[in-house]
Image: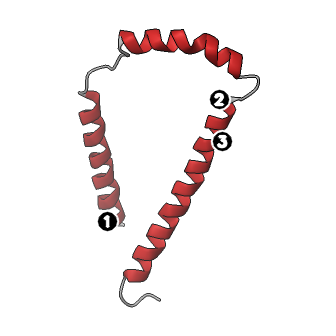
Amino acid sequence: MIVEFLINNVLYKAILFIANIIALAPDVSLNSALSSSLSQISPYYSAIDPIFPIGTLLSILVIELGFIGAYFLYKLIRWAYIKIPGIS
């Protein structure tokens, strides 16, 4: 019980420390050149989108990368678990 309390307290303090560091970062805004290039590409994107749905393809790609990342994390955890002596 004391060990769980210490682990939870340490994790909470670590997360709070990281959150405070992130909060110190300045606000981010897009460069005006990037904003204007995004507005200039809009007509081309709207012309191609009915034929080649870029937004849908990007969504599928992100979901697939999420599954691949989760599988890789699973394999990494299994590898680390097997490397612990005495566990087979």
Circle 1 residue: 2
Q: Does 46 appear above or below 6?
A: above
Q: Does 5 appear above or below 14?
A: below
Circle 2 residue: 55
Of labels 2 and 3, earlier in sequence is 2
Give the amino acid type for the residue marked by disc 3 in the picture. Answer: Ile
Image location (x, y in percent) of residue 40: 52, 9
Quarter of image, res 10: bottom left
Mark 1 to mark 2: distance in Å? 50 Å
Residue at point 59% right, 54% down? 67
Residue at point 56% right, 49% down? 65
Residue 47 vs residue 10, the one in the foreground: 47
- Indicate which disc residue 42 carries: none
Residue at point 46% right, 13% down? 37
Q: Local crowd at mark 3 within 10 Å, few (<14), some, or many (≥20)?
A: few
Mark 2 to mark 3: distance in Å? 9 Å
Circle 3 residue: 60
Apparent side of residue 38 relative to residue 48 in the rendered image (left or right): left
Q: Which of the two discs, 1 and 2, sits closer to the camera?
A: 2
